[in-house]
Image (tube, rainbow, N blue to C red):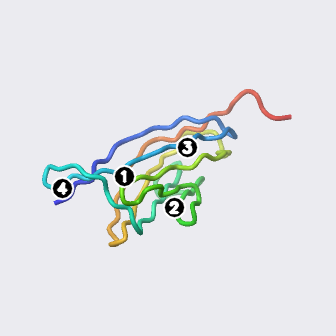
Amino acid sequence: MAEILTSQLDFRHYKGDTFPEQLFQIEEEIDNVVTNMDLTGAVINMQLRIKAGENVFLNLTSVADAGITITDAANGEFKINEQIINIDARKYLYDLQITLANEKVFTYIKGFFEVINDITRPS
């Protein structure tokens, strides 16, 4: 049986600043052997919310590279794209959910995404 190796990752980002590209590689363990997961045909989604089930403040997806890009599907590699994040300053919950081509769904990463106000603002 395959086991997906999951983790918690927290982000802290200044409101209105450019969020740097974040690279990931998904691994799975099958019969005590760790290999890269094949993401061919997968869809990756990430949402920021204040509480589970409430309003979505930021929605990223790999569909049409709308914030997430699968960079090397055969080797389980993808990235959250560099982008300006300009949502209200607060601490959000997020997770990153992957739907594989075989329709299996799993949550790969979860954590907090804190957006903080900066002092300097464009005039």
Is residue 59 shown above or below 16? below
* Labels 4 and 1: the sequence-earlier one: 4
Tell me if mark 2 has few (under 14), some (14-19) or many (20+) residues whose alpha carbon lies within 10 angstroms of its own: many
* Labels 4 and 2: the sequence-earlier one: 4
Q: Secondary structure at mark 1?
A: strand
Q: Does residue 120 appear left or right of residue 106 in this picture?
A: right
* Labels 4 and 3: the sequence-earlier one: 3
Q: Does residue 81 appear left or right of residue 95 in this picture?
A: right
Task: Tell me how far mark 1 sits from mark 3, CA to CA.
Answer: 18 Å
The residue indicated by pointer 3 is 21
Q: Does residue 59 appear left or right of residue 121 in this picture?
A: left
Q: Which mark, by number, is residue 108?
A: 1
- Give percent across and percent down for residue 58: 59, 53
Residue kind at label 3, given as amino acid type: Glu
Tell me if mark 1 has few (under 14), some (14-19) or many (20+) residues whose alpha carbon lies within 10 angstroms of its own: some
- Give percent across and percent down for residue 115: 60, 38
* Labels 3 and 2: the sequence-earlier one: 3
The residue indicated by pointer 4 is 30
Residue kind at label 1, given as amino acid type: Tyr
The residue indicated by pointer 2 is 62
Task: Tell me how far mark 4 sits from mark 2, CA to CA.
Answer: 26 Å
